[in-house]
Amino acid sequence: MARGFTSTPRGYLATFESGEQRLLRQLFDDVITLLRRREDETRSDAETDQAGAEAEPDTEAGTGDAGDADIATDSDFWALVSGISAGTGENRRAAPSEAATLRLLPTGTPDAASEAEAQEFRALTEDAVLQAKLEDLQRAIAAVESRHLVLDLAAAESFGRALNAVRLVLATRLEIETDDDAARVHEISDVANADSVDAYMALLYNFTSWLQETLMTALLADLPDQLGAADDDHGEREDRP
């Protein structure tokens, strides 16, 4: 049976059975698959936009003098214009259509004045957010290759983010939106009661929630020490000539 995270002099320690290792690896890998699918989708859209820009007809020429026509028919000019236009290319990106992927990659600017503004913000930020989540999940998969996890602070924070990504996907699948929904899911705590796909997912959600809670508790318990160390380091830097 898994032993949740505790803070030790060596780092943040947790222990798993082999079956729990396989389960966590699979959960992390499932979320990676979702993100890779989104990555492929946006890459395909970008390639389609690029192909459309390269196929832009040169019939716009002839509306001005000869010098203007030379500029208007220049393919490099049109490539530049298509790249900076707010209405084409990578500056517009619709939100994911799959609910779990949208939960992982939510709209970063809920106060956007328009859908176009929200799409543009997503186009500018989503790839970086997606890659950061992939890196956390890949580190987590590597970490659980060992039954005995010993994580330093940075690795523990990364592992916590990976667990949270799993929980977001499971919460979406289980339609957890209110406290009552969460209470309903938490009631399923015995594998003997897992008589459906939703019940099994509820067990997974409760397991990852418990594991994340033990990690957050251990991290928060060490927070005063971490802040004190940061203050000491800051003071030392200020004293240096």
Image (spheres, rainbow, N blue to C red):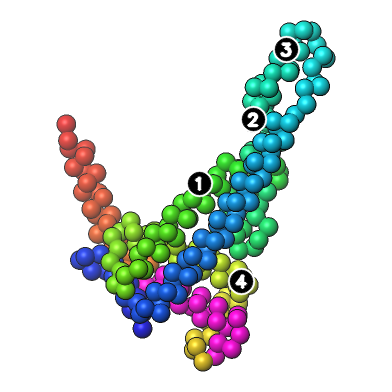
Q: As shown in the figure, which amino acid type bears the numbered disc 1?
A: Ala
For residue 169, above or below residue 58: below
Q: CA distance from mark 1 to mark 4?
A: 25 Å
Is disc 2 placed on a helix, strand or loop? helix
Which image quadrant: the C terminus? top left
| Sequence order check, earlier mark of 1 and 3 | 3
Q: As shown in the figure, which amino acid type bears the numbered disc 2?
A: Ile
Say if the magenta span includes residue 205: yes
Q: As shown in the figure, which amino acid type bears the numbered disc 4?
A: Arg
Q: Which mark is residue 128?
A: 1
Q: As shown in the figure, which amino acid type bears the numbered disc 3?
A: Asp
The residue located at (44%, 69%) in the rendering is 25
Instruction: Pick the residue in front: 84 or 44.
Output: 44
Q: Is residue 31 visible?
A: yes
For residue 201, above or below residue 28: below
Q: CA distance from mark 3 to mark 4?
A: 56 Å
Q: Which mark is residue 70?
A: 3
Q: CA distance from mark 4 to mark 2?
A: 38 Å
Query: Marks 4 and 2: CB-CB under 8 Å?
Result: no
> Mark 2 — residue?
84
The residue located at (64%, 22%) in the rendering is 76
> Mark 4 — residue?
173
| Sequence order check, earlier mark of 1 and 4 | 1
Instruction: Pick the residue in front: 29 or 64.
Output: 29
| Sequence order check, earlier mark of 2 and 1 | 2
For residue 42, above or below residue 200: above
Magenta region: 193-214
Is disc 4 placed on a helix, strand or loop? helix
